[in-house]
Image: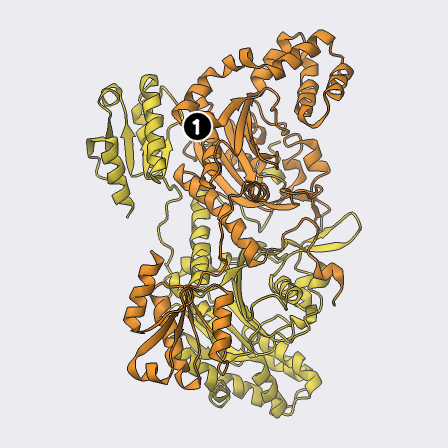
Chain colours: A orange, B yellow
Amino acid sequence: MSDNTVLQPLKGFRQLYPSEKVIQSFVLQKAREIAKLYGFEEYDGPMLEPIELYLNKSSRELVEEQSFKVIDKNDKTYLMRPEMTPTLARMIAAKENSLTLPVRFSNIGLRYRYEAPQKGRDREFYQMDFDIIGSNSTIADAEIISIAVSLLKSCGATEKDFVLYINSRETLTKTLIEFGIAEKNIKKVISIIDKRDKVEKPVFVKMLQDASLSSGQIASINNLLDNPIEYEKSFAEILKLIDSYGISEFVKVNPAIVRGLDYYTGIVFEAKSKGPLGRSLLGGGRYDNLVSGYGAKQKLGGVGFATSDSILIAFLGDSNLLPELNSVPSQVFVSIFDESTLDNSLRLARKLRENNIPTEVYPEVGVKLDKQFKYASAKQIPFVAIIGPDEAKNGTVTVKNMNDRTQEKLSIAELIEKLKNQAL
Amino acid sequence: MSDNTVLQPLKGFRQLYPSEKVIQSFVLQKAREIAKLYGFEEYDGPMLEPIELYLNKSSRELVEEQSFKVIDKNDKTYLMRPEMTPTLARMIAAKENSLTLPVRFSNIGLRYRYEAPQKGRDREFYQMDFDIIGSNSTIADAEIISIAVSLLKSCGATEKDFVLYINSRETLTKTLIEFGIAEKNIKKVISIIDKRDKVEKPVFVKMLQDASLSSGQIASINNLLDNPIEYEKSFAEILKLIDSYGISEFVKVNPAIVRGLDYYTGIVFEAKSKGPLGRSLLGGGRYDNLVSGYGAKQKLGGVGFATSDSILIAFLGDSNLLPELNSVPSQVFVSIFDESTLDNSLRLARKLRENNIPTEVYPEVGVKLDKQFKYASAKQIPFVAIIGPDEAKNGTVTVKNMNDRTQEKLSIAELIEKLKNQAL
């Protein structure tokens, strides 16, 4: 059984030892705090969904090529969910008449994508989704963008570390039509614009030529992308709101941002790292037809964004923003002196825990104190408690401070008081 | 697209609206708090694992019949993890020389079992695992049992609500051999004992007869199960420790408890609801050969237990222990009076959030205040803030207390102070 396929986790999947898990938890906790701060309610959905849920909604690539499939006993195909928004739209559609709209819903959960793993991208990752559904207002758009910025700021990032680009599919479409591009060609042209940052300029021009654009139209597009000052005027309303939210320094109009998902209809945005990572940190947009696509009678517009633990951790690492975190929560390590004081030591641990102090007990009798100290030190536990025969007789405990190596004899009540103050 | 297969979540899978999710989060949060209190480090593992990881380790039934399978492009079979302990054992084996042993590891994560859903059992559920690995000591056993009891107690349960049964596979085996039962027959007999609570007495006797037991041996087994006073003497050491932990009133020796997983070697235990649910709430035991089964050079004994959100929620519901929880975290609802004060209202929301006060903004302009109050009331948000033209001019805000319907005019600083004190 020392077979490598069993001893190795699946490629792109997560096997996190505590020193890695604690970093993930740090990032997920930031998302939970921001969700709470903005009044979001958490929901959840199934990990497996019928493939039909995603067809004609998410991108074709995502559904057909980048998914993990489960086939059940009736030969029905399910996907391990690659994204959450279709599930959410179905949930909203099913209760459109009983929910208090607009809803602010968030989810922190695993997603699966069968892509090539790279820095900041895994096949298994936690995605954090924030959506406001049931409002067509630009205020909802600005609120969502404010949450995206707040999340990155709460992790310690500043405007030196990232920029949030906004665009509008509606405005871009209107502009392209003004350039004389045929309506049936718009979707194709937008998907080419989406690739501009990934290819050389001549390749980009060639792609537009292949889409039957005239050289005048291509010049107009290049001019738009290089110099969007006129284009920006269409964003006056949202930029004013963004000023009220106090996040203008993070936000910039960028006509080249279009986002990959098919269901976006209005504003789209994405935050990009300014550092060496240079990757998209989060993305989102407005989707006004998705919920009715799942049977809602009302036209319920939505706006939301998502980010992942993988990309946030890579970003914070690259930006030197990851704090030092100890995966061991214990404030005190209760050593076992010998068999005669075992009961006293266990009762001490119990008292400490009853007082809400994270406490570890050494689970062996007859191990030298030196070895126990080494254990506590390796785990960076700040205090070690020792009850030997003297302490047991007097109802006291010797407490060693593992940082400054001092020690003192305290009553159990004094120890509890000391550790409680320490925790503040 | 109003197809039912898409509009319904998969059978036994979770689709949780916020009012349900908040209950799940309550239970998972209790597990996190207990993990911290006992000094456990959180780890995580992949959702998909090669089927070989479980073969000859978990129960055959679990692996072959009760699992969701994913087959990759190379025709290799993976399971959506039905349990976590094999993953953990692999992780420990892979780092046996660099980890500070014994480790206290916990995981809260999704598991999948293709079983018939029933009350307290779903196909998709969060399992909470607690394990101490690298200690063969009975103190580790008692510590794990103490955690199990503490978790249920922290949810509000008392000895009126549950009992924790302990047994030992080793002691039971030794006793059965003393009854003259052949060693090769022991595993079979233990699996019959495991079923005793699920069948009528004559069926149980018949099963033992079919396993070639003499009537004398059957009488000995029945006597053991009905009257384990002599048997209990083998548990003196752990019962003494359990007394030190202060949880004697919850713990009872029961020779019929054997647990289903093949890897248990020593103590096994399970907590049972005393109420109408009458189900097993959590289970665990000692597994001394599992980690070496994954290639560890040292013999690293482990002990642990697991429970699930499904069973805990069902248990707490049946025992009337579920608190009233509001899924909406907002402390204050900032209404939008009109376009002229929109900027003031958004800036107020921003200030409140900067002061860590969960705040919701109404995302529409031009909606009557009455309707906005109804929205805040439906979501049980305790305070509504209003900035009309007067307030905007004076830099004040009118605050309505939604519980007693009183209202007052405050400066923004006063409002922040008020809401901060409210949160304490």
How many marks overall? 1
Residue in the picture at 74% in, 67% down: A2
Residue B245 seen in the current view: no
* Quadrant where the image shows the N terminus of chain B: top right
| Chain that bears disc 1 | A
* In the image: residue B328, left or right of residue B182: left
Residue in the picture at 60% in, 88% down: B174
Which residue is nearer to you in this view: B40 or A408? A408
Which residue is nearer to you in this view: A299 or B277? A299
Query: Image quadrant of residue A113?
Result: top right
Position of A138 relative to B62 (above/below) = above
Q: Position of residue B326 (x, y in %)?
A: 37, 45
Residue in the picture at 57% in, 51% down: B12
Q: Position of residue B11 (x, y in %)?
A: 59, 49
* In the image: residue B123, left or right of residue B395: right
User: Which three-letter amino acid code belongs to the residue tagged 1?
Assistant: Ile
For label 1, the crowd category at 10 Å Cα-Cα, with few meaning under 14, some 14 to 19 and many 20 or more, is some
> Which residue is denoted by mark 1 in the rendering?
A247
Query: Image quadrant of residue A217?
Result: top right
Local secondary structure at mark 1: loop
Residue A101 seen in the current view: yes
